[in-house]
Image (tube, rainbow, N blue to C red):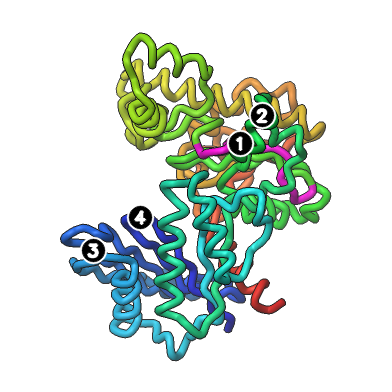
Amino acid sequence: MSVVLVVNSGSSSMKYQLTDVEAGEPLASGLIERIGQAEGRATHTVRHPSSPGSDAADDTFRVDVAVPDHDAAFAHMLDAFAEHGPSLDDHPPVAVGHRVVQGGARFFEPTVVTDRVKRDIEELEVLAPLHNPANLAGIVAAERAFPDVPHVAVFDTAFHQTLPPAAYTYAIDRELAAEHRVRRYGFHGTSHRFVSRAAAEFLGRPVDELRMIVLHLGNGASACAVSGGRSVETSMGMTPLEGLVMGTRSGDIDPAVLLHLQRVAGLDTDATDRLLNSRSGILGLGGHADMRDLVQASESGDDAATLALEVYAHRIRSYVGAYAAQLGRVDAIVFTAGVGENASIVREWSLAGLEGFGVEVDPERNRRRGSDARRISTDASKVAVLVVPTNEELEIARQALAVVDA
């Protein structure tokens, strides 16, 4: 058994998962919330793989605890493993894999953490001030908790390092852009990598033969054109704000709109940032940041919610068309993440009217729910339309193990 501990450290929370990489299954997972606040909460779930003909229930344990910092979060995690299992003595991790959001143009593959790597992650905080500092805090705390285990950083941006210059370059003054590292980096790369390979496996074809469009639709959302297993175009840019409409983020917008609002509405930089990242998207349009609530409101006759859904789907359809042109041929369109995997109306509306491009969604297959990869296109559809659940933790574990084994 090759076991990897995967850590996703945020500023006020820390997710973890102990993964059996060979089996592709989690042994346990957890969430430490409200780090730095007076009272936090620790949730630990022990996974019980179901045997044929049975559905074994997982065991979940919750406790309210004080979590002053990330070191305390790791202490609570270790206590949970000791008290509830599985025993880390019986399942010792051979590596700790860390999600790091921004790797800039420096990191294009999973990387063993060294003092130099930590300095680089810290130096890149200017490009991801909300994420990289917390990712780094988790790495430092994890090294203290697991001093004798290799630690591997897996970067959200790494998969998109194969973008051609024409795709990652913004049309602004090139010297200014170079000085301040202004370019498209893209995000959700770990998910796009996992899903594109899982889709190829589902189709029974080598990933290097396929051209596909992957739509990662969650609270954050991004599209990616994948050719031969390599990212060649993606919708998120220098930050995760560009591209598709999201839960609370605007996605693409005319930059002059921001100048206009600064002039006529008196918005300063911080207010503009809050508007675009926290008060826009389907929340700003329809009053709901959760797609389930938005769909329910639309079905109840809320016109604003319906318009928000239409705008959301329209933007996706526009990107599908643009990426089809970039790829030259599309073998598969793949939906993933919370909205992509569960919101049938989003899938239906996003691909409506594309029959002339060889895309035919089967309504009954589309409405059918499931936790496994599945085809929702008709048998006659020239383009396979799939729903493939993402598993970023497993992908991080796989990459971390590959680095250690190498």
Residue 143 visible to the viewer? yes
Question: Is 233 included in the stretch rendered in magenta?
Answer: yes
The numbered mark, 1 or 3, whose residue comes first in the sequence reads: 3
Q: Which residue is mark 1?
A: 182
The numbered mark, 4 or 3, whose residue comes first in the sequence reads: 4
* Mark-to-mark CA distance, 1 and 3: 38 Å
Image quarter of residue 60: bottom left
- Asked if disc 2 and disc 3 are in contact, CB closer than 8 Å, the reply is no
Residue lying at 66% horizontally and 29% vertically, measured from the top left: 170
Of marks 4 and 3, the one in the foreground:
4
Q: Main secondary structure of the magenta part?
A: loop
Classify 10 Å Cα crowding around label 1: few (below 14), some (14-19), many (20 and above): many
Q: Which residue is mark 4?
A: 11
Residue lying at 64% horizontally and 20% vertically, measured from the top left: 353
Which residues make up the magenta segment?
A: 228-240
326 w.r.t. 58: above or below: above
Q: Which residue is mark 2?
A: 170
263 w.r.t. 47: above or below: above
Q: Is 222 or 107 nearer to us in this picture?
A: 107
Three-letter code, disc 2: Tyr
Q: Which mark is residue 41?
A: 3
Three-letter code, disc 4: Ser
**Residue 382: horizontal and vertical position, in percent?**
77, 34
**Residue 100: horizontal and vertical position, in percent?**
52, 57
